[in-house]
Structure formats: structure tokens, C-alpha cells
Image (cartoon, rainbow, N blue to C red):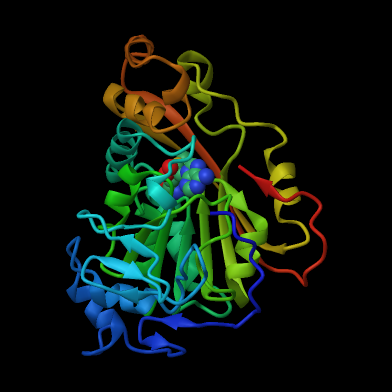
Amino acid sequence: MSEPSAAPHNDAHVSAAGVGGRGDAARPGSAAHHAARGSSPGTRQGLWETLTSAVRCPVCRAELEVGERSLRCPRRHTFDMARQGYVSLLAGGRRTVNADTAAMVQARADFLGAGHYAPLTDALGRLAASLRAPGDGLVLDAGAGTGHYLAAVLEALPGAVGLALDASPYALRRAARAHPRAGAASWDVWQPFPVRDGCADVVLNVFAPRNGGEFHRVLRPGGALLVVTPTRRHLRELRERLGLLDVDPEKEARLERALSGFFVRERAESLEYTVSLSAREVENLASMGPAARHVEPRELIARVAALGEPVEVTVSVDVFVYVAAGRTEPAGGTDE
Ligand SMILES: C[S@@+](CC[C@H](N)C(=O)[O-])C[C@H]1O[C@@H](n2cnc3c(N)ncnc32)[C@H](O)[C@@H]1O
């Protein structure tokens, strides 16, 4: 849906203790307590009762009510909760071209599960916990994938609840189970997000498309945007030999253009280290990214085999913390 985001700024605050609260995540009767209780897919009612303080009907922007296995607005626009626990907010299960496939998501889950990006996962948790006004409210992850990083940030913010937005149903199935305090919903991040203005304390954006205007609209004043992008040295040992796409030398400039006018950079951390990978792990690493779309799986396996094992691979990323700027006209708009 491409409804314009014209609602007035209402400074909603969603917390694990309920709207407007700052409370103990595990307090019996609190939303976080319900969330933790309803951790299995399909039993996330308590969590969604909290999340619907932020989430709006994507058709008419009205408030949503939580039903048995759906969310519904007063005009009867109804959004099903899949058996696997995520809510389909994208009309008619519409998919976007860049949504990850089942195979890409499996490869990503396996690779991240092996811990090779643990320093990045830890850095995001540490940065989220150190924010000037640490969010005990809502953490919104745009392009969340399997919800791996959202889960780490929620661990670092015990009072917060999370919302994973992604266009891939395969990713959402995993994101819906990534953390007891995380809900997941299908959405195209190029469209106005189906949430209230100013409802999020933290927006996460890790290797995913970014929509500066929407990030700005949904963050509450004083909230923070955490962005992770690869540097040109990221996976450099693999790029040529496996046919992975090069990191655009203009990537950082494009990031600045996409966010300028909306955000100012408050902090940047560079993370660079080497991992030693088996052939299977290299295959997963290549298969979870854009290479999966342009190199045939058989060809990829052959190229990986030719590398021998183990393979030493550089992980090199930048982690940026942005805070909202006073709103001016953006120079750029959106970026991926
Ligand atoms: C490279 S993956 C990163 C996933 C996750 N942030 C991580 O680092 O593990 C990019 C994610 O963005 C999602 N995506 C791509 N285009 C999208 C769009 N227009 N709207 C929502 N999600 C999108 C993909 O489905 C995928 O899960």
C-alpha cells in the first residue's frame, strides 16, 4: 500500500510495560511478561497487544485489534497471523523483488548461527544499551531477515519489545521466533511503514534497504538509528573468486545522501577481523547474499571447492549511530 504518511506526530511510546511506561520486563501481568509467556509461534497474543500500540492498519491507518489469529481494524481490514507467527501486513501476500528466497534465508540462518558475525552482533547490543536515552520501548528492525540482530538488541534492552519488518516470508518465519519479545510482520520498506509516528526508540538497519524519511518519521525524538554497512574490504578474499558483487565505492556517500536532512551521524565504529571458514560455511556466506541471484548453485559449489579449506575471510563493516536532525529537505531520499 502506498498511503502517504501524513498523520500528525503523536509521540507514541511503546514499552514492554505497556504504552507510555518504563517498567520491569518480567513483571507479572505486564506486556513483556505476556510476551515472554507467548514465545511459541501462534501464541503471541500478549506481545501483539503491546505492538498494536504502535502498529497501524496499513490500509486506513486506524488502530488494530488483536483477534484469535489476526489483527483487525474497525473498518474490518483484516491481517492474518501465519501459522509460523508473523503477521501479513503486505496486501495479498505481495512480495517485493528483493525479498530473500527460502535458500538464502536457510544459508543466512546457518551462517549467523555458527557465530562468525558475533562481534557485530555484540557491538549492536552494546551500542543499543549505551544510547543516551536507552530504548526500553520499541525496537524496529527494517529488513530484519531472520531477526538475529533484533534478538541481540532486545537482549541488551530488557524492557523493550521488537518488531521485525521484512518482505520475505521465509525470513519472517524465523524472525517471529527469534526472541520472545519480538513480533514479525511482512512489509515493503520502500512503502510508508504501518506504524505510528514517533513510536520507536531504536531503528535497526543491518545490510538492508533504508528509507531515511520513514526511519525519521517512526523514531521518537531522541531515538537512534543503528545502521550497518559493509566496507570495500568485506569478504575481499571471496569477491573475485566466487563472483560476488563488489561493494560500491560510493556506498558511504549514498548512505549519507539517503539519510541527510533526516539524521546526523553521532558515532561510527569500524569492525574488521578474520574468520576461518569451512567450504560449507563459505557456501552459506555466498548463498545468503546477492550472489545467490546471479551465480548458479552448482557453479557456486564448484568455485567454493576450488578454494580449498579452511578459507581465511575478512569481515569488515561499519556500524553507524544516527540521531534525528531537525527536519530539512533531504538531499537524497532512499538507498539500499
Ligand atoms: C542482506 S539481508 C539482511 C537481513 C538482516 N538484517 C541480517 O543482516 O541478517 C536483506 C533483507 O532485506 C529484505 N528486503 C529486501 N528488500 C526489501 C524490501 N523492499 N522490504 C522489506 N524487506 C526487504 C530481504 O528479504 C532480506 O531479509
Closer-to-camera residue (238/185): 185
235 with respect to 305 (left or right): right
| Coordinates of residue 6 in the picture (x, y in percent) | 67, 70
In which quadrant of the rendered view does residue 85 lie? Answer: bottom left
In which quadrant of the rendered view does residue 39 lie? Answer: bottom left
Closer-to-camera residue (42/267): 42
In which quadrant of the rendered view does residue 133 lie? Answer: bottom right
Residue 286 vs 327, above or below: the answer is above
Residue 244 vs 107, above or below: the answer is above
Answer yes or no: is residue 250 visible.
yes
| Coordinates of residue 234 in the picture (x, y in percent) | 54, 34
Answer yes or no: is residue 273 visible.
no
Identified at 74% across, 69% down, the residue is 325
Closer-to-camera residue (176/25): 176
* Number of marks: 0
Identified at 23% across, 65% down, the residue is 69
Q: Residue furthest front?
A: 75
250 with respect to 30 (left or right): right
| Coordinates of residue 101 in the picture (x, y in percent) | 36, 34
| Coordinates of residue 312 in the picture (x, y in percent) | 41, 27
Residue 16 vs 168, above or below: the answer is below
Quarter occupied by the C terminus: top right
Identified at 78% across, 72% down, the residue is 326
